[in-house]
Image: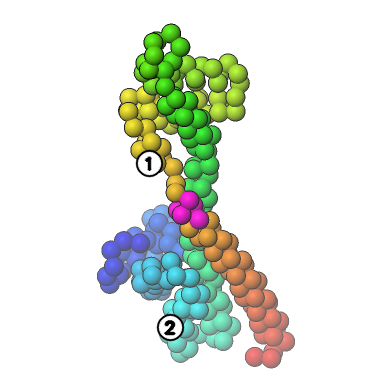
Amino acid sequence: MGEKGPVTPEEAGVYLKKGVGGRRVKKGEEPSEELVAKAIKEITRRRTKNENRDSGLGFEKGRDHALDLLTYSLDNQSQEEISQRVLESARWDLEGTRAILEQRRERVIGLIQEHEKWLPIFDFLNNLEKRYDKGGEPGLGRGKKKPFRVFLDEEINKATRAGEQVVDLFQDKEVTVFLHKIKKTSDFRAEIERRSLSSERLDKLRKRLDFVYQELEKLQKKEQLDKDAEELEKVEFEQGIN
């Protein structure tokens, strides 16, 4: 969330107006001191937890600001108000964690889907390369070959007429630009490598995706537990057990 460093009240006010942590002040209104204090804690927490984002997003560590809030409130809040504030703060933390996980999930899925989209094009070009490398073309004399760009255009036209599966991708703007580059280079293997993902990279991405889904499942269970605890607390309070 920007460069690390102490968060000023002015900066916290800007974030609140943008809706940090799902909080947003109305246009033309200034945030209260209490909201600014909360925003400072939330921004600071996010800044100092970047390492945790890649190592497992420790959920319990995100509760420290809730405990601070509890201590701050003991002198001038009722038990019900304190409990509500702690639960609200914890919910705020969970919402932020869910947003991070869902963003990461979409990014990883996008990378994998982008790679898979190009696989038919890579297969098409690899097959062309093998046929082109066999040697001479009929009518050009022994050992002579058509320029690859001419050969590629002819094969694209053949595939189009035959209605092959890869034809739909020929209409894609990115694919069109990519094929144009291929026609102008003598080493299109490098272009393919730049566009594709290695098997090692794909394996890491799929493992990362599995991890994200596991964390989302844990988060869902945690949210349910918190919801159950909140309902139980309401019942206990109404019955005067507190």
Q: Main secondary structure of the magenta part?
A: helix
Q: Dots 1 and 2: beta carbons under 8 Å? A: no
Q: Amino acid at mark 1?
A: Arg
- Look at the picture and state if 189 lies above or below 202: above
CA distance for labels 1 and 2: 49 Å
| Residue at x 37% of width, y 41% of height | 194
Q: Amino acid at mark 2?
A: Asp
Residue closer to the observer: 109 or 89? 109
- Look at the picture and state if 173 lies above or below 153: below
| Image position, residue 78 (x, y; %) | 54, 86
| Residue at x 44% of width, y 70% of height | 55
Q: Is residue 82 magenta?
A: no
Residue at the extreme front: 142
Residue closer to the observer: 127 or 169? 127
Quarter of the figure that contains the N terminus: bottom left
Q: Which residue is mark 2?
A: 68
Looking at the rendered structure, which numbered label has been put on residue 194? Answer: 1
